[in-house]
Image (cartoon, rainbow, N blue to C red):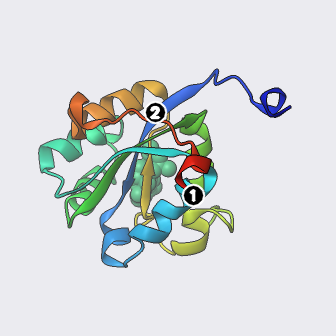
Amino acid sequence: MIDSLEMESEHMERTFLMVKPDGVQRGLIGRIISRFEDKGFTLVACKVVQVTENQAKIHYAEHDGKDFFPNLVNFITSGPVVAMVWEGDDIIALSRIVNGKTNVNEAQPGSIRGDFAAHTPKNLIHGSDSPESSKREIANFFEDHELVNYDKIISSWI
Ligand code: IDP
Ligand code: MG
């Protein structure tokens, strides 16, 4: 019976999620991580990091040349972040819905940005926007051996 409710994991993905310096300073790490745990995603790597200027430029390479790029690099290197890799079905698209729209004026209530962010550059959370970005972003912060493979089978732990 239960077997018939299980779905094939056809789009199992990993994504890079990062609590930005504003989230760390505001004491929102736990509440932000809870949103992804609540969604049912699996945390496969997590560390507190002071982002270097070089790392920031690689991370935001797609925005190089835009007028806000220097501010973006300054902001992301302005204090420690929590760098994470999470796993789940369709997690790249779904986690960006959990994050909310980039512009805080458009971020829906119930999303991290919609509930906690009040100024657009300081929007608390980063999430990769494609499989290609997630690969590059994960490699910019983690070695392969830091990514842990495991299943969550809740009943045996209660
Ligand atoms: P995302 O974080 O939702 O993927 P991106 O367009 O990739 O949004 O932009 C990266 C980050 O740059 C945003 O999260 C935000 O902090 C900042 N940003 C984006 N657009 C602007 C802007 O027009 N002015 C200032 N900062 C911006
Ligand atoms: Mg982006």
Disc 2 secondary structure class: strand
Residue 123 is situated, as x and y percent measured from the top left of the image, at 45, 64
Q: Few, some or many C-alpha atoms within 10 Å of disc 2 (few <14, some 14-19, many ≥20)?
A: many
Q: Can see residue 54?
A: yes
Disc 1 secondary structure class: loop
Q: Quadrant of the N terminus?
A: top right
Front residue of 67/141: it is 141
Compared across the picture, whether 44 is left or right of 59 comes to right
In the rendering, which numbered label is found on residue 14? 2
Give the amino acid type for the residue marked by disc 1 in the picture: Ile
Q: Based on the displayed image, in which of its 4 quarters is residue 64 positioned?
A: top left
In the rendering, which numbered label is found on residue 1? none
Compared across the picture, whether 141 is left or right of 95 comes to left
Q: Is residue 6 above or below residue 55?
A: above
Is label 2 or label 1 in front? 1
Compare marks 2 and 1 and give the one earlier in the sequence.
2
Q: Residue at x 49, y 44 (%)?
A: 42
Residue 86 is situated, as x and y percent measured from the top left of the image, at 44, 42
Q: Residue at x 31, y 35 (%)?
A: 147
Give the amino acid type for the residue marked by disc 2 in the picture: Arg
Q: Is mark 2 within 8 Å of ligand 2?
A: no
Front residue of 17/121: it is 17
In the rendering, which numbered label is found on residue 158? 1
Q: Is residue 100 above or below residue 84?
A: below
Q: Residue at x 23, y 41 (%)?
A: 141
Q: Can see residue 102?
A: no
Numbered marks: total:
2
Q: Few, some or many C-alpha atoms within 10 Å of disc 1 (few <14, some 14-19, many ≥20)?
A: few
